[in-house]
Image: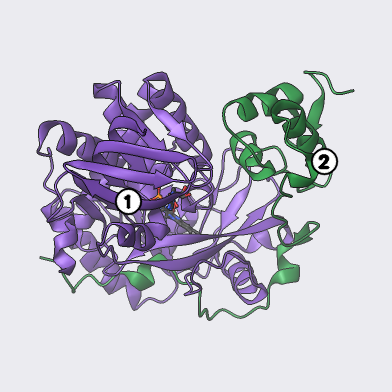
Chain colours: A purple, B green
């Protein structure tokens, strides 16, 4: 005998847990989240966690990200303090030639209502006095910020559980079958039946998709991060490359490598990351590094989110994306709408899996 | 003996009670406890609390000590200055800047 649920979500990271929480706001029973380890053990526990809007391209994707950033302050009211801070985001450039590119970006974004300022050297230094005085300028947007990803997932999970959602952790899904109109989810700890199934397995999406015969074209891209000892607050903005967390630690890194699921940290990238930090903020040279970590990004083949109904299989949904922290409140909101109302308040057709067909 | 108020992680000041709470909530390994409480994320990088957390997991779940996975140890093993790691190069291969990735002319309407 298997236990039956209305909806099963596979994957309890920032994407799966957001969907679980948002669904549980509107219906209280019959929801199960399954995770092969514990939520936060995947990508969502090893991220910079910027809520980043400006400099996303194309512009309609930046607009999508903007709506998600706009949901963050309300989210904190509903699930509790997740240490979301709208600091403003600064993306520096060091060669004057790049100013043209930055201006074009600002112009395009102005048309969709995202204000980006292109700053001079003096303006950058006025905003961020410890920045390298050799900087040429920066793009700046007030919308960007960051969040504590551990608190975010923890609060999603606690609130979802309070609303009746079941979590089954340390329970790997090993097979998915169809029986009549039901999904039969086979896992290490048991077999479950559900009417609806949502695949939210981050970097493991391709493997999970194979269990039910669909292709979810998600690749793995490793990122390595350095963390300093807590320093007195001295960086005000989320800088593309580093940010200072509430407890004073500075998180540094913006690296991308093809390394499959290998989560090692490597000296060459760590050295480059140290170079980047000192290049941006020279005063960091004397700061002590307490640890390095690495995470595996879930990277769709074309870089854009994969969201919504899976074409050809009724009641099967997918949510897999890079920038899942930025997009999490919006993805949860939209998938809850799609499941419960059959339509979404913002169009998501562009993000359909069908574009890869 | 450890009681509820015993500090398990000195760097982040996490008590027995806080560690036990997240284990009751589903955490099963040191790394789960770390992400939920920050226990082990401070300057000592789990050197002091590693075995204490294992004892709490054992006490709360009955799991045998040898079966409790060790935390993932991370470079550097003791704190070092950023400048010690740096090589002074300013060209980057794996590390990019965000603006490097922006191609405003492409795909924008
Ligand atoms: C270094 C780095 C920096 C980043 N910086 C940012 C940033 O600044 N801003 C931003 O928005 N994003 C950032 N990201 C990306 C962001 O972290 C991810 O997009 C997001 O965490 C993805 O969440 P997820 O829930 O889809 O995946 P995950 O957190 O990986 O969750 C997937 C879950 O599925 C479970 N699972 C997989 N297969 C199975 C199975 N067979 N059975 C059961 N469970 C299974 C896993 O255990 C896992 O918990 C960064 C990523 C990295 C690596």
Q: Quadrant of residue A306?
A: bottom left
| Residue A344 image position (x, y, % from top left) | 12, 39
User: Disc 1 vs disc 2: Cβ atoms closer than 8 Å?
Assistant: no
The residue positioned 39% from the left and 54% from the top of the image is A202
Q: Which mark is residue B51?
A: 2
Q: Is the residue A291 above or below the residue A189 in the image? A: below
Q: Quadrant of residue B56?
A: top right
Asked whether the residues under marks 1 and 2 belong to the same chain, the reply is no
Label 1's element? strand
Residue that extends furthest to the right in the rendered view of this protein? B1
Mark 1 closeness class: few <14, some 14–19, many ≥20 residues within 10 Å: many
In screen coordinates, is A24 left or right of B29?
A: left
The chain identifier of the residue carrying mark 1 reads A
Q: Quadrant of the C terminus of chain A?
A: bottom left
Task: Examine the rendering and report whether any part of residue A72 can be seen.
Answer: no
Which residue occupies the foreground of this view, A265 or A77?
A: A265
> How far apart in space, not on screen, are marks 1 and 2 (Cα)?
39 Å
Which residue occupies the foreground of this view, A95 or B102?
A: B102
Residue where numbered disc 1 is placed: A176
The residue positioned 49% from the left and 57% from the top of the image is A125
Which residue occupies the foreground of this view, A267 or A35?
A: A35
Q: Quadrant of the N terminus of chain A?
A: top left
> Is disc 1's CB within 8 Å of ligand 1?
no
| Residue A2 image position (x, y, % from top left) | 36, 34
The residue positioned 49% from the left and 64% from the top of the image is A254
| Residue A194 image position (x, y, % from top left) | 27, 36
In screen coordinates, is B2 left or right of B102?
A: right
């Amino acid at each position: 005998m298997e236990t039956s649920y209305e909806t099963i979500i596979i994957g309890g990271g920032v994407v799966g847990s957001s969907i679980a929480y948002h669904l549980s706001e509107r219906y209280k029973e019959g929801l199960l989240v399954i995770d092969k380890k514990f939520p936060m053990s995947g990508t969502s526990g090893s991220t910079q966690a910027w809520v980043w809007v400006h400099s996303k391209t194309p512009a309609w994707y930046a607009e999508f990200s903007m709506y998600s950033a706009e949901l963050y302050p309300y989210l904190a009211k509903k699930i509790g303090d997740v240490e979301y801070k709208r600091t403003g985001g600064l993306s520096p450039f060091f060669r004057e030639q790049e100013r043209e590119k930055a201006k074009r970006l600002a112009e395009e974004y102005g048309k969709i209502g995202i204000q980006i300022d292109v700053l001079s050297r003096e303006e950058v230094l006025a905003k961020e006095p410890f920045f390298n005085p050799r900087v040429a300028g920066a793009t700046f947007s007030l919308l960007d910020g960051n969040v504590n990803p551990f608190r975010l997932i923890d609060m999603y999970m606690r609130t979802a559980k309070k609303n009746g959602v079941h979590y089954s952790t340390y329970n790997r899904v090993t097979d998915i079958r169809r029986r009549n109109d039901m999904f039969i989810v086979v896992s290490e700890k048991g077999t479950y039946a559900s009417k609806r199934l949502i695949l939210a397995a981050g970097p493991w999406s391709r493997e999970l998709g194979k269990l039910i015969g669909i292709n979810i074209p998600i690749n793995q891209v490793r990122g390595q991060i350095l963390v300093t000892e807590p320093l007195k607050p001295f960086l005000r903005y989320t800088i593309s490359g580093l940010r200072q967390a509430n407890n004073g630690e500075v998180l540094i890194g913006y690296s991308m490598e093809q390394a499959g699921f290998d989560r090692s940290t490597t000296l060459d990238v760590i050295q480059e990351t140290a170079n980047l930090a000192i290049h941006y903020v020279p005063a960091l040279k004397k700061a002590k590094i307490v640890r390095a970590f690495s995470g595996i990004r879930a990277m769709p083949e074309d870089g854009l989110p994969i969201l919504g109904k899976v074409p050809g299989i009724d009641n099967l949904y997918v949510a897999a994306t890079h920038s899942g922290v930025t997009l999490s409140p919006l993805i949860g909101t939209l998938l809850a709408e799609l499941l419960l109302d059959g339509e979404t308040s913002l169009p998501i057709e562009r993000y359909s899996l069908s574009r890869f067909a | 003996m450890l009681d509820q108020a015993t500090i398990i992680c000195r760097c982040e000041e996490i008590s027995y009670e806080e560690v036990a709470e997240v284990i009751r909530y589903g955490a099963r390994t040191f790394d789960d406890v770390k992400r939920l409480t920050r226990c082990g994320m401070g300057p000592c990088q789990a050197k002091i609390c590693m075995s204490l957390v294992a004892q709490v997991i054992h006490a709360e779940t009955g799991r045998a000590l040898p079966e409790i996975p060790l935390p993932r140890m991370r470079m550097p093993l003791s704190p070092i200055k950023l400048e010690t790691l740096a090589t002074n190069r300013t060209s980057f291969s794996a590390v990019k800047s965000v603006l490097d990735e922006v191609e405003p002319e492409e795909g924008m309407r």
